[in-house]
Image (cartoon, rainbow, N blue to C red):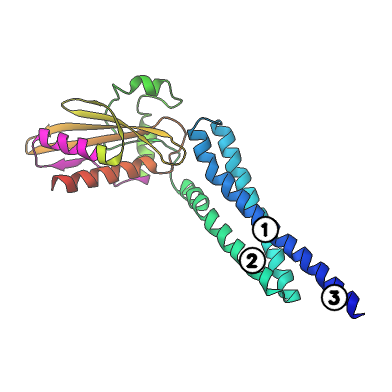
Amino acid sequence: MAKERSERSLQGGVWLTLLAWLSVIALIASALLMAGAGPAYRWELIGLGDAFNLMRNGVYAAIAAVAISVLLLLVSAFTRRFGTGVVAIIVLAATAALLYMPWQQWQLAQQVPAIHDITTDMQSPPTFVALRDAREAAPNAVDYPGKSTARQQQNAYPNVQPLQVAAPKATVLAAAQAEVEASGWQIAAITENTIEATATTRWFGFEDDVIIRLTELQNGVQVDMRSASRLGTSDVGTNAQRIETFLNGLRERLE
């Protein structure tokens, strides 16, 4: 009798160990799929649709890891096998951390409008010249989309406003160029009044085009800016944040 009980206990321990390994494998698979989707697309190993499929499969793997871990935790608690219970808790915590960023991006996408072209001057947006050919070859339009986008931008990003500074135009232009270079953007052209550059996102390598325009005022210079994605309907707030961050940095640099 004792021998049978021991054998059942051993078999139960084997099954719990197997569940623990399955939860860990599902977690690792999820991390690899989600982390690798961006670089694989950026290095042109796969298309954008395939990259999104990898991310989607990564989420499915994470859900599987959670389900297995919950089952493992319940059975471990019932059988008082605390070692496998600890594994379940660790996998659950790691999966939650892994899913936090995609969940945060999804939440943000629900809160912001599906627009991808942001400017401080919606009446007369800065116009791309040096980057026009590159934008014409991309899916998104070259020209500013118009009133509908402007209305959505005003409601979602009221803080995107021109910057006015009391400084000579040459000084502002030099400071703007220094800020562009500090931001890591690739400069396409610089004129007396404008700077055109391309910002590349870190993970997927999406290219967003930026133009900074200087207009002389009676007592200084007004800095207008436009940031537009080449690809995608929604930028999830990236372009608005880029403009605000850049103009704040430029203000500090000039001060």
Q: Is residue 53 above or below residue 111?
A: above
In the image, residue 42 lies at what x, y percent? 48, 34
Q: Nearer the viewer, residue 30 or 111?
A: 30
- Please name which of the two marks, 2 or 3, marks the residue nearer to the observer: 3
Residue 125 seen anywhere in this rendered image of the structure: no
- Please name which of the two marks, 1 or 3, marks the residue nearer to the observer: 3
Q: Which mark is residue 214?
A: none
Q: From this viewpoint, which residue is outermost toward the bottom?
A: 2
Q: Nearer the viewer, residue 6 or 149?
A: 6
* Drawn side of residue 185 relative to residue 35, left or right: left
Residue type of the residue flagged with mark 2: Val
- The quadrant of the picture occupied by the N terminus is bottom right
Using a 10 Å C-alpha cutoff, classify the residue at mark 1 as few (fewer than 14 neighbours), some (14 to 19) or many (20 or more): many
User: Residue 190 sits in which quadrant?
Assistant: top left
Instruction: Name the residue at 43% across, 35% down.
Output: 206
The residue beneath circle 3 is 6
The residue beneath circle 2 is 87
First in sequence: mark 1 vs mark 3: 3
